[in-house]
């Protein structure tokens, strides 16, 4: 019991509770996947300093919509003669939950700071596909796990307010995940993801 008490006291002493951050970010994403392509999205995040390091929890959301003329197979891998040619509306949704550790203020120049970080990510891809003439529609999905690193430049105390602005670049490598084998899978295999974020955070 004393050991637990000492660990709790140590955590309180290490964590800087006056420099927490909560924020939002406009996010531009580039991928090597032709279905999700290069969408624009947003993220919300919480940052907690722990000594000279910091831990960050983040949720990312992006969506890509497109229309094209092609084969619609109802989602299942049927024989070629059962495919339907149709005008197709396709909407792909990308969600990610991330946990990362950061080394803030690695280098400073004129109140601008260089920061680096690395973490893990759990990503969920979903596509909704509709035949505009046939009315047929179906959804496919896949979950992926991966790792990433980030580099950012930040500036805080904007106009002497507890506000932080940051430009952040993130590079993610996503591994193959679980998916249904009897349906078309637009997200199967590894996916390379690059993100550019414009972050706005409130410090408290």
Image (cartoon, rainbow, N blue to C red):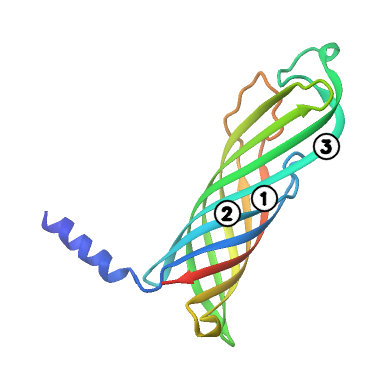
The correct choice, above or below, for 203 with respect to 140 in the image is below
Q: Which residue is mark 3?
A: 67
Residue 80 or 139: which is nearer the viewer?
139
Q: Residue furthest bottom?
A: 110
Please name the residue shown 64% across and 56% down the image.
171
Give the residue displayed 80% in from the left and 12% down from the top: 79
**Element carrying mark 3:** strand
**Labels 3, 2: front one:** 3
Q: Position of residue 109 (x, y in %)?
A: 59, 85
Residue receiving disc 1 = 193
- Residue 82 percent location from the top left of the image: 82, 12
- Which residue is depicted at the point 45% across and 63% down? 47
Say which label, 1 or 2, has the lower sequence index.
2
**Image coords of residue 133 (percent x, y):** 84, 23
- Crowding at label 2, few (<14), some or many (≥20) Cα neighbours within 10 Å? some
Disc 1, disc 2: CB below 8 Å? yes
Q: Nearer the viewer, mark 1 or mark 3?
A: 3
Above-or-below relation of 168 to 105 = above
Name the quadrant containing residue 194.
bottom right
Query: Is 65 placed left or right of 9 in the picture?
Result: right
The CA distance from mark 1 to mark 2 is: 9 Å
In front: 193, or 161?
161
Q: Residues within 10 Å of mark 1 (few under 14, many from 20)?
A: some
Residue with the most extreme left position: 2
Closer to the camera in the image, 146 or 154? 154
Image location of residue 42, percent across then percent down? 62, 55
**Going from the N terminus, do you reach mark 1 or mark 3 first?**
3
Give the residue displayed 67% in from the left and 35% down from the top: 189
Label 2 belongs to which residue? 148
Q: In what element is the residue under mark 1? A: strand
Answer few, some or many: residues within 10 Å of disc 3's Cα (few below 14, many 20 plus, some between 14 and 19).
some
């Amino acid at each position: 019991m004393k050991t637990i008490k000492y660990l709790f006291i140590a955590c309180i002493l290490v964590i800087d509770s006056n420099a927490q951050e909560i924020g939002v970010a406009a996010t531009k994403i580039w991928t090597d996947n032709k279905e999700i392509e290069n969408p624009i999205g947003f993220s919300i995040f919480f940052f907690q300093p722990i000594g000279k390091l910091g831990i960050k929890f983040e949720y990312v959301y992006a969506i890509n919509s497109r229309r094209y003329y092609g084969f619609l197979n109802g989602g299942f891998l049927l024989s070629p003669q059962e495919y339907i040619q149709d005008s197709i509306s396709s909407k792909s949704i990308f969600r990610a939950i991330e946990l990362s550790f950061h080394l803030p203020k690695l280098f400073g120049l004129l109140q601008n700071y260089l920061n680096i970080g690395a973490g893990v990510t759990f990503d969920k891809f979903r596509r909704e596909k509709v035949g505009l003439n046939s009315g047929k529609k179906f959804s496919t999905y896949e979950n992926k796990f991966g790792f990433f690193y980030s580099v950012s430049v930040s500036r805080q105390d904007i106009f002497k307010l507890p506000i932080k602005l940051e430009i952040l670049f993130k590079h993610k490598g996503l591994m193959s995940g679980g998916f249904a084998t009897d349906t078309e899978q637009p997200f199967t295999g590894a996916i390379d993801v690059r993100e550019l974020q414009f972050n706005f955070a409130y410090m408290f």
